[in-house]
């Protein structure tokens, strides 16, 4: 099959699924709707596999399938095609989106089986995948932005899916509005890049990027990339715009798995990796990205430790893991960022779906204080969640170990990195191990605290099959990126396939020195050791002596309260920005709109209405009166003529 | 005995005065009378007053245009009378009277 047909099938199949389900949105046949939606994504998955297969057969430095469907906007110098590009970076993304996406669609059939809006749900989900594909495949920043906005819309629709609940509808709006702040910055970034380079085409931008680093803070590239990064903090939930992601857990759990863990929130990382030649020559931007990434990784992890809602913990964990990806990007390690993006998509989707399975069997109970001992009732969910847990705490040889370790190593070794960044990453990793073990202990292990009225049970096969598939991926998915020093001691010396695959499209880190293998081994061992220790501590706290955490939290008092209230960031935003803005707007509304504009128009309309009622009183319907007016009129006209 | 000279003295002004008198009478009838039939008759009176002026002007200026115009006016007047009378008949059928005030019901 030719490439453009494959590309069209890849992109349009979810759109067709959206229309098929969207046109019969009232239907409640979960199996049919879910079948259509899953098939649509699976067809996309097959076409992306075929496309990637084509890529593999090409020579390494010319791996690129670029299809231009039509000319979209041609105004003066602004030339934008509706073109799509599969290269090494977007190949990984389309495989993850359609692959993990099909599994999550399959899971949704079981999870949403009894929901009245099931068809609407699946149509939104397909629309999301369509927009996500536009985002990752678009060959210009504007096409990317179309997808960027489209996934934002679908995210809003799906967070507020149960919109009759005021709180959930508000969460949807919060996500949308927070993202708009980032989007405004993204637009500014695009403007700056267009004015500087005269194009928005990603390939052209990457070619035009200068080879010398720009040291000024106010240089065009630094400013442009900084604004793009602010856009990324909105979409990828980084400080300061992360606040929407925890609230986004109001949506159905498979949505959290697909949109708010595996795909959409990684769009910011992807965008930066795709523009890596531009970002690498703006060291100031890179420094900001690395610092924000590391700060977010630690900050979100501390909040994660204190939460009780199973989905909120996973949400803060997602923010924290996204922080790692930005840390990697910020130190110039674009490959490890993509690698972590991929493994994170596997294990975080797995954990979200696992939590969905738990919530499903617990009859919508999300508080882990009311769980415990679920291992006995849900063996498959427990086993797969266990793999996800091992992956996220970075236990070798599970997927998360390789990607996280590579990020930590690069943040230490790269000349753009710093020991402090590495230390923050390591502390964050230890905290990750702690809160994830806490989650495992309180949910699956220990004594059961389940209410008597609830009888937990294993989920149907539609939900366990995706869990098993993702479990396998989380276990072995990291083996394609085994670092050099480990590969040396393994039989057959497996290569770091992932790094080799990406190498032609990534700019190397300038002045990257050679490091001692012993140092790398030491840091690797250190981070694994930290993770093991903190997991053990968490296990001790929450299974063996459940009173200890209470004592500690009481001893910490105000600090614990501050953290468990999420550092009062929401309250701060409300107090410092939102409330003043709202009251200012109210004043403007009252003074300008009500008192000035409205009153002016009222005066005009009163005048017209008064004149109208005066004339209307003459309109009696009495013919003779009309004839009288007529006669008087003639007399008047004649008088005027004669008097002249 | 009437002197035939009197007729020879009749000029344009005489015709116009008669026409003006007729017109005023017609107008008074339209404005004051309540009976629709009478009002229609008064309208005819007004139209014919106009016809008279047209013919008079035609005669005294040696121009036939005025007389041609009169044919048109008469045609229109016939049509108007037909329409007006049919409305009057309808009104009569409904209200058993042809008072002008019933025309107020035609108001939308």
Image (spheres, rainbow, N blue to C red):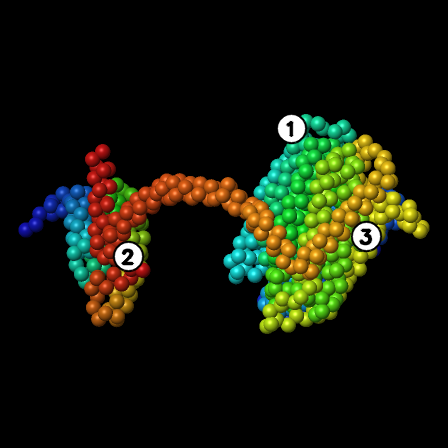
Left/right of residue A591 with respect to residue A154 in the rendered view? left
Q: Residue at position x 19%, y 43% from top?
A: B12
Same subunit, tags 2 and 1: no
Disc 2 packing (10 Å; few <14; some 14–19; many ≥20): some
**Rendering coords of residue A563 (x, y %):** 59, 48
Find residue B77 and name its label: 2
Q: Nearer the viewer, mark 2 or mark 3?
A: 3
Dot 1: chain letter: A
Dot 2: chain letter: B
Gap between marks 2 and 3 measured at Cα: 109 Å
Left/right of residue A424 with respect to residue A626 in the rendered view? right
Same subunit, tags 3 and 1: yes
Q: Is residue B92 visible?
A: yes
- What is the secondary structure assignment of the residue under circle 3? loop
Disc 1 packing (10 Å; few <14; some 14–19; many ≥20): few
The residue wearing badge 3 is A396
Same subunit, tags 2 and 3: no
Q: Are marks 2 and 3 in contact (CB under 8 Å)?
A: no
Q: Residue at position x 77%, y 33% from top?
A: A415
Find residue A218 and name its label: 1
Gap between marks 3 and 1 measured at Cα: 44 Å
Query: Which sits earlier in the primary sequence, circle 3 or circle 1?
Result: 1
Q: Are marks 3 and 1 in contact (CB under 8 Å)?
A: no
């Amino acid at each position: 099959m030719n490439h453009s047909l494959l590309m069209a099938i890849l992109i349009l199949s979810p759109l067709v699924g959206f229309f098929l389900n969207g046109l019969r949105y009232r239907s409640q046949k979960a199996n049919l709707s879910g079948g259509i939606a899953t098939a649509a994504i699976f067809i996309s998955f097959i076409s992306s596999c075929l496309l990637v297969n084509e890529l593999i057969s090409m020579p390494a430095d010319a791996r690129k399938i670029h299809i231009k469907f039509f000319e979209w906007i041609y105004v003066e110098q602004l030339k934008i095609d509706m073109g799509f590009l599969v290269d090494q970076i977007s190949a990984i993304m389309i495989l993850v989106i359609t692959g993990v996406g099909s599994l999550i669609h399959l899971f949704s059939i079981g999870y949403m089986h009894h929901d009245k809006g099931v068809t609407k749900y699946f149509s939104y989900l397909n629309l999301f995948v369509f927009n996500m594909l536009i985002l990752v495949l678009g060959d210009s920043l504007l096409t990317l932005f179309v997808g960027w906005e489209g996934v934002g819309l679908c995210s809003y629709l799906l967070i507020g899916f149960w919109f009759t609940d005021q709180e959930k509808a508000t969460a949807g709006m919060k996500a949308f509005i927070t993202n708009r702040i980032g989007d405004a910055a993204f637009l500014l970034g695009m403007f700056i890049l267009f004015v500087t380079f005269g194009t928005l085409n990603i390939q052209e931008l990457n070619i035009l990027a200068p080879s010398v680093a720009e040291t000024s803070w106010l240089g065009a590239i630094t400013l442009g990339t900084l604004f793009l990064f602010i856009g990324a903090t909105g979409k990828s939930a980084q400080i300061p715009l992360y606040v929407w992601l925890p609230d986004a857990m109001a949506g159905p759990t498979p949505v959290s798995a697909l949109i708010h863990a595996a795909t959409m929130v990684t769009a910011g990382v992807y965008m930066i990796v795709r523009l890596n030649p531009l970002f690498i020559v703006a060291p100031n931007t890179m420094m900001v990205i690395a610092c924000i990434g590391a700060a977010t990784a630690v900050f979100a992890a501390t909040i994660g430790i204190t939460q009780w809602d199973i989905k909120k913990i996973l949400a803060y964990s997602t923010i924290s893991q996204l922080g790692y990806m930005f840390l990697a990007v910020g130190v110039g390690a674009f490959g490890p960022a993509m690698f972590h993006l991929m493994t994170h998509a596997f294990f975080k989707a797995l954990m979200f779906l696992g939590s969905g399975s738990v919530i499903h069997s617990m009859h919508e109970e999300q508080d882990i204080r009311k769980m415990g001992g679920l291992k006995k009732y849900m063996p498959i969910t427990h086993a797969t969640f266990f793999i996800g847990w091992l992956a996220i705490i970075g236990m070798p040889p599970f997927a998360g170990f390789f990607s996280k370790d590579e990020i930590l190593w690069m943040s230490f070794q790269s000349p753009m990195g710093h020991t402090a960044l590495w230390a923050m990453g390591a502390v964050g990793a230890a905290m990750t191990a702690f809160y994830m073990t806490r989650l495992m202990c309180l949910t699956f292990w220990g004594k059961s605290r389940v209410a008597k009225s609830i009888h937990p049970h294993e989920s149907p096969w539609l939900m366990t099959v995706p869990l098993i598939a993702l479990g396998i991926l989380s276990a072995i998915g990291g083996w394609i990126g085994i670092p050099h020093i480990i590969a040396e001691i393994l039989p057959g010396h497996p290569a770091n396939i992932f790094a080799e695959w990406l190498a032609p499209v990534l700019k190397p880190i300038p002045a990257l020195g050679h490091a001692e293998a012993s140092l790398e081994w030491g840091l690797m061992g250190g981070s694994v050791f930290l993770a093991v220790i903190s997991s053990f501590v968490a296990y001790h706290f929450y299974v063996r002596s459940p009173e200890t955490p209470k004592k500690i939290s009481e001893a910490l008092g105000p600090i614990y309260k501050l953290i468990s209230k999420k550092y009062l960031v929401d309250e701060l935003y409300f107090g410092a920005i939102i409330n003043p803005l709202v009251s200012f707007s109210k004043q403007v509304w009252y003074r300008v709109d009500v008192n000035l504009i409205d009153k002016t128009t009222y005066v005009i309309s009163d005048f017209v209405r008064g004149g109208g009622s005066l004339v209307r009183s003459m309109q009696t319907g009495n013919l003779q009166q009309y004839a009288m007016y007529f006669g008087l009129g003639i007399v008047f006209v004649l008088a005027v003529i004669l008097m002249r | 005995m009437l002197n035939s000279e009197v007729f020879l003295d009749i000029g344009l002004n005489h015709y116009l005065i008669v026409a003006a008198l007729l017109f005023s009478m017609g107008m008074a009838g339209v404005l004051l009378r309540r009976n629709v039939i009478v009002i229609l008759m008064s309208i005819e009176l007004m139209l014919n007053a106009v016809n008279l002026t047209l013919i008079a002007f035609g005669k005294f200026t040696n121009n036939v245009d005025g007389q041609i115009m009169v044919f048109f006016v008469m045609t229109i007047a016939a049509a108007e009378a037909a329409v007006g009378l049919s409305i009057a008949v309808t009104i009569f059928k409904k209200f058993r009277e042809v008072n002008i005030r019933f025309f107020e019901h035609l108001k939308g």
